[in-house]
Image (cartoon, grey):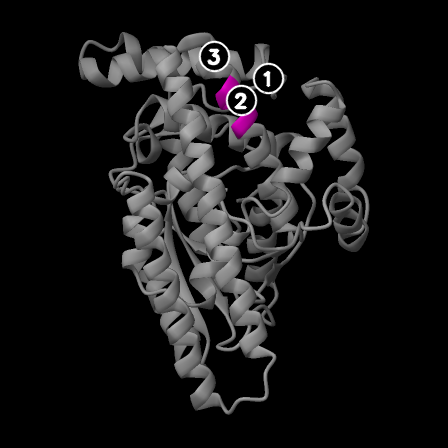
Amino acid sequence: MARFIIWVGCAMSVRLIAAALLCLFFAGCTSVAYYAQAVQGQMRLMVGARPIPEVVNDTATDPGLRQQLERTIAIREFASSELALPDNGSYRSYADLGRPYVVWNVFAAPEFSLEPQQWCMVFIGCVNYRGYYDKNDAELYAGELRQAGADTHVSGVPAYSTLGYFNDPVLNTFLRFGEQEVARIIFHELAHQLVYAEGDSAFNESFATAVENEGMRRWLNQSAPQERLRDFARQLERKAQFQRLLADSRDKLRALYASALEPDAKRRAKAGVIAAMRQSYADLKSSWGGYAGYDQWFSQPINNATLGSVSLYAQWVPAFQAMLEQEGGSLPRFYLRVAGLAHLTKAERSAELAKFSPSLTGSAEPSPDSLALK
């Protein structure tokens, strides 16, 4: 969902606006332009939103869009009534931004490290991405980072959360992907409104992904033919295999970067690991019967930043799933337990989550089929 601070998974709030205003008054602030574009982009989004019932009842509304929005109303009601997600004004309005993504996130990492770069902002804390409402601005900033020697990656984001500070609208940027993707995003982004730990992107995104997965199972079980539920189960299995593939490659890269090889030798070996990963994907795709949902991801340049851009979304998902099982599937009890973790330090949270499996590391990935959307 954000990727300012933004995501698919991402955060921006009233505090960001306050930060921008402070920058305008204090000459020492070096990020005036960045904060200003974030505030301007958010304001334009809000001004362009219309209540969904108004759009549905407008005789000028395209019938296809009307049908999509009617299904979105049902998804939104399900999120609060059945998943105990916030019952507020979010996802009860609609905005067509006239572009394919709401923002573009910039990710960066050192040439010989998988540790993602962080950006820390006034009042908000630190995140592992930097978002722009204009793709050219994102590309320009990524270019500056590359010139400084960093690996970079720019990713289009179909949705982000303002953590409940604003009423987030349904956007054309994710409505275009169909009902299942709309449900996935709404469940994911509403989860961010429940629990958010500043400075811990992996915790926040993993929690929202766990809620998204559970929400999708329950939504499909209630509203879809059993075949669609089986398709979703196959998607999750492909996701697990994709996660293992990237985790193995990251392990190889970590060992390489820790070695005493000279930089040129490391670069050659790094390219070899990435080439081997692509070949392994080709083998995996064959075992899937040719399913091509990850082709777009593997067709792009892959580097440490590319790997990092997908590592945030599921690092702790197995731990959260185990926690939900311990709570007997009760989402309200699960949310309270996760909220307790959010009050700990990042190190304390990681230690608690790691207890659920000694194999849990920082190398899991986001929803597989959603990668094809980016």
Above or below 88: residue 16: below
> Label 2: few (<14), some or many (≥20) within 10 Å?
many
Binning the other alpha carbons within 10 Å of mark 1 as few (below 14), some (14 to 19) or many (20 upward) gives many
> Magenta stretch mostly in which secondary structure?
helix
**Residue at image mark 3:** 221
Please provide percent x and percent y for residue 194.
66, 30
Q: Which of the two residues, 120 or 352, is positioned nearer the viewer here?
A: 352
Q: Which residue is mark 1?
A: 83
- Asked whether disc 1 touches disc 2, contact meaning CB atoms under 8 Å apart, the reply is yes
Percent of width and height locating residue 233: 45, 26
- The tag earlier along the polypeptide, 1 or 2, is 1
Say which residue label 2 marks. 215
**Residue at horizontal 37 percent and vertical 38 percent from the top:** 369
Residue type at tag 2: Gly
Distance in Å between CA atoms under marks 1 and 2: 7 Å
Q: CA distance from mark 3 to mark 1?
A: 13 Å
Which structural element holds mark 2?
A: helix
Range shown magenta:
213-217
**How dense is the environment of label 3, judged by Cα within 10 Å: few (below 14), some, or many (20 and up)?**
some
Q: Name the kind of residue labelled 3 in the image.
A: Asn
- Quadrant in the rendering for residue 317: top right
Q: Which mark is residue 362?
A: none
